[in-house]
Amino acid sequence: MATSFAAHPSTNISFLANNVIEFKNSVYESYGQGDERLFLRSKEGSVDLDNQVINLIGDVEGTFNLDGKTFDLKTNGLRGNLIDKTISSKQSTLFETEDIEIVSSDMEITQTTLEGIKILFNNVNLDKINLGSRISKGKANEVELFLAKDLIVMKGKAVFSEDNMKIISDEIHYDLSQDIVLKSVNSKIINNL
């Protein structure tokens, strides 16, 4: 995802043993190919130069620009591994785009050649799904968001609420761009709620 980056600590830089730098009121920016950009802000943070790990703590806010789309992120702690290009949070996370709002207990962003960028969420509530869609809310034990495919895969006690109907399933595959359920495993549909 990123080819270069800059960290801008605004105050109180501390250099610790073992090549770890601590900072307060920081901003992290990373630029990739084309319009790819990552912007993160936090109250505190550290960079482990040996392991190429960035830790951000306290009111972490971020914006990702990928493939012409903007994604916003809010959490209390975030960890970025510059070697394997992963970003993760073990804290409650709010992830938003124009089309969707996800609230989860944690999150991990990975990138592979095969899947592109994939975001994994656990203990998920979908509070907004596709503006103008009949599907208004959802929840699942686990949600995988595949950005390049505009695909959401919901696993474990997956539920979609649509107008006066509810879909309860072990697994739901939903296409954001086409606003359709592609696959549903072991489903139960409840009408006239």
Image (cartoon, rainbow, N blue to C red):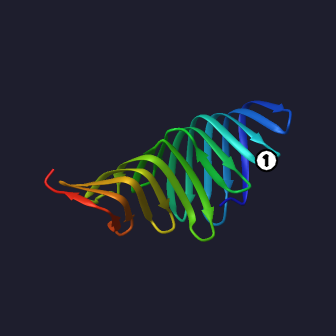
Q: Nearer the viewer, residue 88 or 12?
A: 88
Q: Nearer the viewer, residue 157 or 13?
A: 157
Q: Position of residue 42 (x, y in %)?
A: 62, 36
Which residue shows up at 37% across the image and 64% down it? 174
Q: Give the answer, above or below, for where 148 lies relative to 58.
A: below
Q: Quadrant of residue 118?
A: bottom right
Which residue shows up at 43% across the image and 61% down it? 153
Q: Secondary structure at mark 1?
A: loop
Q: Position of residue 192 (x, y in %)?
A: 13, 54
In the displayed structure image, the side of residue 61 where residue 142 appears, left or right: left
Q: Quadrant of the N terminus?
A: bottom right
Dot 1 amino acid type = Asn
Rate crowding at label 1 as few (under 14), some (14 to 19) or many (20 or more) other CA atoms within 10 Å: few
Q: Quadrant of residue 116?
A: bottom right
In the displayed structure image, the side of residue 50 where residue 80 appears, left or right: left
Task: List the single residue furthest toward the front.
Answer: 186
Q: Give the answer, above or below, for where 70 lies relative to 28.
A: below
Task: List the single residue furthest toward the top.
Answer: 12
Residue at numbered disc 1: 51
Q: Position of residue 122 (x, y in %)?
A: 48, 48
Q: How many marks?
A: 1
In the displayed structure image, the side of residue 82 where residue 143 appears, left or right: left
Q: Position of residue 61 (x, y in %)?
A: 55, 41
Which residue shows up at 42% across the image and 47% down it? 124
